[in-house]
């Protein structure tokens, strides 16, 4: 279930015409695929941070993990320098990586324009692993599994936390 292109664009009395409606639906399907994969990547990144933070003895602010957010170049460069070579296979994966690395076209008040940690995970883990971890992230946030159980599912965790 969820949001589908047929629910976004519908015809009434053959308006819009069939070709136009088909093109709109195809574009909507592509945009929805990008949004789902991007949000899955962000959710996994947040889940990893949450699980690591909840496992620490003391509550640490985000700046303890990444440095000051006002100066993002330091942590952006840190993740960029440690990229591994998980190659994006599809156009959607390439576009999601591009958005995470270079930013959305417009800023928003509730998130950073770029997502360097999510971009790093896209290259470090690959999208297949991110898709699998998304289900585990949902279980973590719904308290069906513990932080430790979630982190056990993250491949190469020891390498990830020592970057």
Image (cartoon, grey):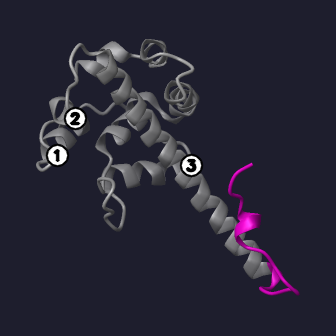
Across and down, in percent, residue 104 comes to 36, 61
109, above or below 44, in the image: below
Which sits in the foreground, 107 or 145? 145
How many residues crowd mark 1 within 10 Å: few (<14), some (14–19), many (20+)?
few
Q: Which residue is mark 1?
A: 69
Q: Is residue 8 left or right of residue 55?
A: right
Q: Which stretch appears magenta?
A: 1-18
Is residue 55 placed above or below 66 in the rendered structure?
above
Foreground residue among 136 and 19: 136
**Spatial CA span between label 1 and label 2:** 9 Å
Residue found at the far right of this picture? 13
Q: Main secondary structure of the magenta part?
A: loop
Residue matched to label 3: 36
Q: Quadrant of the C terminus?
A: top left
Report whether residue 127 is seen.
Answer: yes
Q: Quadrant of residue 32?
A: bottom right
Q: Position of residue 151 (x, y in %)?
A: 43, 17
Q: Position of residue 134 (x, y in %)?
A: 54, 32
- Mark 2 or 3, nearer chain start: 3
Closer to the N terminus: mark 3 or mark 1? 3
Residue at figure coordinates x 42%, y 48% from the top left: 97
Q: Height in image: 126 above or below 157?
A: below
**Numbered disc in front, either 2 or 3:** 2
Q: Residue 42 magenta-drawn?
A: no
User: Is there CB contact under 8 Å for labels 1 and 2?
Assistant: yes
Determine whether the residue tagged by mark 3 lies in a helix, strand or loop. Answer: helix
- Is residue 91 visible to the viewer in this orientation of the structure? no
Q: In the visual, does 80 lie left or right of 137?
A: left
Cα distance in 3D space between marks 3 and 1: 26 Å
Dots 3, 1 in contact, CB < 8 A: no
Q: Nearer the viewer, residue 162 or 45?
A: 45
């Amino acid at each position: 279930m969820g949001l589908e292109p047929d629910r976004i664009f519908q015809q009434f009395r053959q308006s819009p015409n069939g070709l136009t409606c088909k093109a709109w639906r195809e574009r909507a399907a592509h945009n929805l695929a990008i949004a789902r994969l991007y949000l899955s990547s962000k959710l996994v990144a947040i889940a990893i941070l949450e699980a690591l933070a909840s496992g620490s003895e003391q509550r640490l602010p985000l700046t303890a993990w990444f440095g000051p957010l006002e100066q993002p170049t330091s942590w952006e460069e840190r993740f960029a320098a440690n990229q591994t070579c998980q190659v994006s296979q599809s156009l959607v994966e390439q576009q999601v990586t591009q958005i995470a690395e270079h930013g959305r076209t417009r800023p928003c008040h509730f998130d950073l324009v770029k997502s360097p940690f999510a971009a790093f995970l896209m290259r470090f883990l690959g999208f297949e692993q991110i898709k699998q971890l998304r289900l585990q992230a949902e279980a973590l946030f719904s308290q069906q599994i513990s932080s430790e159980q979630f982190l056990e599912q993250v491949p190469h965790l020891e390498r990830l936390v020592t970057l």
